[in-house]
Image: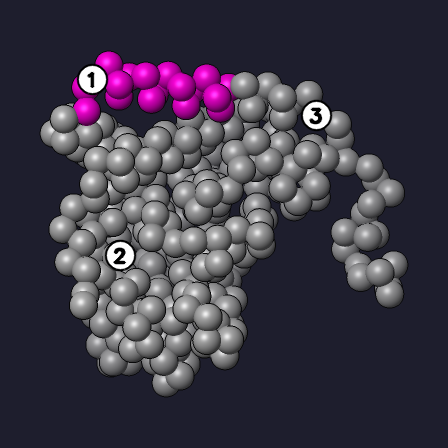
């Protein structure tokens, strides 16, 4: 019998709200560190899109796979990745999730099913399709979820992934986080038609969700994932959201003019997923004092992790070869 996924219970809402706060506090910290010149590379922040990743990953276990995008910090944390290990990685410290050798674009934790971010636009589509194929061969009930953005929907690999996944009935959920921009190009300038309509020719069901409403994402992705797990094949989910920060924090250094109006950004800030999540908690009977306590607890926790990460040891340069080559080749 199918689950109707009407509404998440209060306990689930609290957990998702807290996870969104973990992402927000971590990303705000990393943005400030970049601007202060304390990071070795630019960062692509997930601020404004937290509800999308959290609402979907709330249905996943460590055994399920995800692949990510330039905004991989958010997906890593939404899937349950360790914030300390991620912060240390971005600071290029030995305590990092990849030993300080991967950096901001490659945060991954295979033990939690996090196959990592990818600097190639649409690079995760083929990887997730392969993971879904492995899951089908093993028959273990796992699913693979691929997060990608508007720009990646125009890559040929998107069509290839849908074609193969549909033909082979793979347990793959394709999630387009539609934030209205492909780097610095407005989506309607580069994209013909609606991305959700591309599912139908491949006999794939399409789902749409308000990507800034964590409860709506949870409800819709629950139905989509139920379909995928049933053996019926892949599904496409489009979450409509917005990155309230730029494509990359470094863009202020090389763009002579802003490409988005202040009014556009402000209109989306007014639909902030964190504040909408807090409103949902209040509607569910959670006291304002408890909501404030959650905010304070998360803020203090991330600040403590960040302090530890900054003082962690640097990676041992002698590990470079072993990090890049197999033991037989080292």
Q: Secondary structure at mark 2?
A: helix
Marks 1 and 2, Cα distance to the nearest angstrom? 28 Å
Residue 259 percent across, percent down from the top left: 33, 40
Quarter holding residue 84: top right
**Residue topped by disc 3:** 312
Question: Which region shows up in magenta?
Answer: 286-303
Q: Which mark is residue 221?
A: 2
**x then y, percent, for residue 79:** 44, 47
Q: Is residue 293 magenta?
A: yes
Structural distance between the alpha carbons of marks 1 and 3: 36 Å
Would you say 189 lies left or right of 106 here?
left
- Is 98 on the left-hand or right-hand side of 72? right
Q: Earlier in the sequence, mark 2 or mark 3?
A: 2
Query: Which of the two discs, 1 and 2, labels the residue nearer the N terminus?
Result: 2
Dot 1 crowding, Cα within 10 Å, few <14, some 14–19, many 20+: few
Q: Nearer the viewer, residue 253 or 87?
A: 87
């Amino acid at each position: 019998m199918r689950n109707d996924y009407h509404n998440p219970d209060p306990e689930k809402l609290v957990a998702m709200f807290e996870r969104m706060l973990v992402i927000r506090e971590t990303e705000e910290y990393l943005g400030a560190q970049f601007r202060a010149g304390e990071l070795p590379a630019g960062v692509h922040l997930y601020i404004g899109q937290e509800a999308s990743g959290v609402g979907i990953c709330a249905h996943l276990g460590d055994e399920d796979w995800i692949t990510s995008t330039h905004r991989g910090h958010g997906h890593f944390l939404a899937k349950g990745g360790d914030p300390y290990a991620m912060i240390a990685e971005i600071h290029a410290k030995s305590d990092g999730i990849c030993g300080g050798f991967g950096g901001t674009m490659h945060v991954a934790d295979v033990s939690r099913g996090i196959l990592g971010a990818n600097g190639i636009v649409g690079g995760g589509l083929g990887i997730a399709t392969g993971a879904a194929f492995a899951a089908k061969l093993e028959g273990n009930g796992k699913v693979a979820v691929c997060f990608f953005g508007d720009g990646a929907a125009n890559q040929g690999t998107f069509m290839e992934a849908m074609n193969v996944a549909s033909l082979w009935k793979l347990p793959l959920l394709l999630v387009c986080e539609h934030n209205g921009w492909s780097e610095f190009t407005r989506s309607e300038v580069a994209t013909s038609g609606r991305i959700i309509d591309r599912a139908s020719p491949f006999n794939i069901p399409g789902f749409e969700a308000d990507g800034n409403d964590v409860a709506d994402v949870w409800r819709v992705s629950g139905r989509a994932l139920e379909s995928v797990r049933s053996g019926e094949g892949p599904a496409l989910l489009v979450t409509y959201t917005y990155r309230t920060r730029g494509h990359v924090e470094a863009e202020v250094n090389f763009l002579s003019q802003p490409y988005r109006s202040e009014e556009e950004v402000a209109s989306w800030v007014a639909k902030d997923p964190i504040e909408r999540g807090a409103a949902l908690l209040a509607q569910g009977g959670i006291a304002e004092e408890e909501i404030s306590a959650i905010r304070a607890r998360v803020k203090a926790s991330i600040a403590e992790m960040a302090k530890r990460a900054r003082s962690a040891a640097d990676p041992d340069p002698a590990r470079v070869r072993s990090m890049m080559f197999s033991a037989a080749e080292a």
